[in-house]
Image (cartoon, helix red, strand yellow):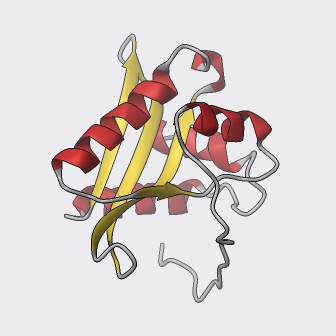
Amino acid sequence: MNPMAALLSELFAIETDFEVDATKQRHGLTRLLESSSGKIWVAEKQARIVGLCTLQVLISTAQGGRVGLIEDVVVAKAHQRQGIGSRLLDAAEAWARANRLSRLQLAADRSNQGALAFYQTRGWGSTQLVVLRKLLEKVPR
């Protein structure tokens, strides 16, 4: 399995809103890499990918310009609590600032208290907004 897709599988296994489907994850990563509005950062240890963070640029009417949506932040369980997630978020934030994005946002599974605490210690705060979704169609394989 693609190492980035394997990390997403690890993430989606603990998020109740998503399903592990390596084909979909590979397809999404490929589309993101091909997109001019998407970025992926990876963390490597001993030539193995052990973490990743994805960001997509959107236009916000509230901000009046470009903002970033961080959709995935994951560090392999064996490599957590080593500062890797912090460095990935630092890289995404530095890129966002350099590219004049005015806001970053992300969604986290409310049952994942460890992740929520991690984001709060990194300066992320909750909002009054609730994330809703409506699935429209399956992604072509």
Q: Which residue is farthest bottom? A: 136
Relative to 93, residue 15 above or below: below
Where is residue 66? Give x, y as percent.
27, 68
Which quadrant of the structure image shows residue 69? bottom left
Q: Left or right: where does residue 108 sit relative to residue 60?
A: right
Q: Left or right: where does residue 27 sit relative to residue 15?
A: left
Where is residue 75? Give x, y as percent.
55, 30
Q: Left or right: where does residue 110 sit relative to residue 83?
A: right
Which quadrant of the structure image shows residue 36? bottom left
Residue drawn at 65 percent across, 85 percent down:
134
Whether residue 72 is visible here, answered yes or no, is yes
Which quadrant of the structure image shows residue 31? bottom left
Q: Which residue is farthest top? A: 46
Q: Nearer the viewer, residue 117 or 22?
A: 117
Residue drawn at 40 percent across, 26 percent down:
87
Relative to 37, residue 140 above or below: below
Q: Left or right: where does residue 7 sit relative to residue 52?
A: right
Where is residue 84? Give x, y as percent.
47, 22
Relative to 136, residue 66 above or below: above
Where is residue 123? Give x, y as percent.
52, 38
